Amino acid sequence: MVDVSGNELGTVVSTWDGPSTGMFSFVLSSNAVRQGQFVACETEQGMLIGQIVEITRANRYFERAESVSEYEKTAPMMDNFPVTDWEYTVANAKALGIFKPSGSGGIQRSTFPAAPGSKVVAVDAGILKEFLGFTENGLQLGEIEHHKLPAKIDMTRLLQKHLAILAMSGAGKSYLASVLMEELLDRKQEHGRMAVVVVDPHGEYLGFKYGEYADRTSVFDGRKVKIAFHKVTPGMLFEFMTELSATQKREVEKALYELRDESKQKQAGYGIDDLMAKIEGSDIKENIKGPMLAWLSQLRKLRLFGEADYPSMKELARPGRLAVLDLSEMDNNKKKQMLVGYFAKKLLRLRKKGKIPPFVLVIEEAHNFAPEKAQKGQAISRGIITTIAREGRKFGASLCLISQRPVHLSTTALSQCNSNIILRVTNPFDIDHIGESCEGVDKNMLSSITTLRVGEALVLGEALNHPVFVRIRRKRSRSSPKGESLEAMARRFDAGEEKKKKDVEAFL
């Protein structure tokens, strides 16, 4: 039986719609009840766990508008009638399932409704922890709303089948991602540690290289990142040069293989200049050769290729460490996509071979790297991101896609993210896209995410047995130096202008 001593919240009542196997309503005997709270009552099946989806208040003295209006003309009704004696509050709860203690069958589907008159109580924290699927060694993202229960989410359940963090600008996506990274970096070796690789277009995670996480963080300036040209396969090169015709691809592939054979004999590498020289000296027709050389020249101007990869895979993927690819000083979107596409391919390939540890690839502004409707030439990295989304879970290659415009994010990639953390979203197109792409989201949840405050999030999907609202904990890492407020930037600019003016006056 359910222990009702000291925590009774109300009594189940009959309504036009229930109690049913999916819903039950109860009249409150306590005001300590809130929307989203978990409750329990005893049924023939056992302990039924429910979640309050709506709360309504009623008073028979105020049911007829014309009567209230007439009485209020002379004096407030509260002065003449015992209105408080007729007021009552009803909570509508969704039946989530029958709780069975560990070793006795787990959670069962509710197949018989709660009886009217049954007592409704607050759920014990230990029962709720087991019911939702939290683990003692999980990643603590915050605390469950309305319950003093740490939200410790199992790492495998959260990340193995990929994670999407979705929210409007300013709702706390990067803050939440920082908390997640802290949890991954703080894990003990015996609990399993992953490598964390972050694609950072705006320098939002540069704060990790200061403070307590500095010894576990490596930041790589995107302007210095290089791709070893001799490691670029024909297939990769064709993704960089989508304009090539079938004939041109055949000639480029032939030239690359010749260069590879020559480099093996000379035991020396080769670069893009060598490929251009090889094509220039060939007997290819000019109308084919000219465009090929022009496109290769455009690639060379990106200054992306070098003799060796930087960073190397050993620098990029190390267990219990964070690697940040800082792309904030890069303006060329194609160059960014080439870098992300190339290193993501290498990460997946080496993980398949077991040469690097299991990793999570965190991609900020994911809609820019895996856009839904962009042509292939403007979506160079989309292919490998969707490949990891489809295949990565088998090999310990996880994705964390972060986006403020999910409607522009690849539906294939988003639908493969079996866990979602959604902060405030108000754009109706994004809300509809979330409802279509994320499993387990119902209308009540979609309406709730428009009213979330900064730091509040809805966690749902594979990560937990049931969706929950979580208040994100305070992060321990430092904020990025590039994350200044508008006021701070304005003050710094004015101070700089004043200093220039004083320096000129002093010189004169």
Image: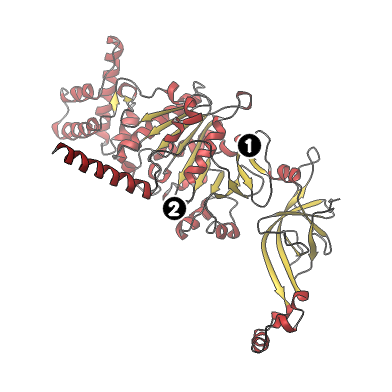
Question: Residue 360: x and y, percent?
Answer: 51, 33
The residue nearer to you, when weighing 492 against 443, is 492
Q: Secondary structure at mark 1?
A: loop
Question: Residue 292: x and y, percent?
Answer: 20, 32
The residue nearer to you, when weighing 490 against 94, is 490
In the picture, measured across the screen, residue 364 lies left or right of residue 194, that is left
The amino acid type, in three-letter code, at marker 2 is: Val
Residue 365 numbered mark, or none = none
* Residue located at (50% from left, 29% from top): 213
Residue located beneath label 1 in the image:
154
Question: Residue 59: x and y, percent?
Answer: 72, 76
Q: How is the image coloured?
A: secondary structure
- How far apart, in angstroms, are the residues tagged by discs 1 and 2? 28 Å
Q: Mark 1 or mark 2: which comes first in sequence?
A: 1
Q: Does residue 413 show up?
A: no
Residue located beneath label 2 in the image:
407
Q: Secondary structure at mark 2?
A: helix
* Residue located at (50% from left, 37% from top): 399
In the picture, measured across the screen, residue 94 lies left or right of residue 490, that is right
- Residue lying furthest right: 1
The amino acid type, in three-letter code, at marker 1 is: Asp
In the picture, measured across the screen, residue 128 lies left or right of residue 191, that is right
Picture quadrant where residue 299 is located: top left
Do the residues bearing badges 1 and 2 touch, measured as CB atoms within 8 Å? no
In the picture, measured across the screen, residue 50 lies left or right of residue 397, that is right
The residue nearer to you, when weighing 55 against 311, is 55
Image quadrant where one finds the C terminus: top left
- Depth check, mark 1 against mark 2: the one in front is 1
* Residue located at (69% from left, 70% from top): 57
For mark 2, does the 10 Å Cα neighbourhood hold few (<14), some (14 to 19), or many (20 or more) residues? many
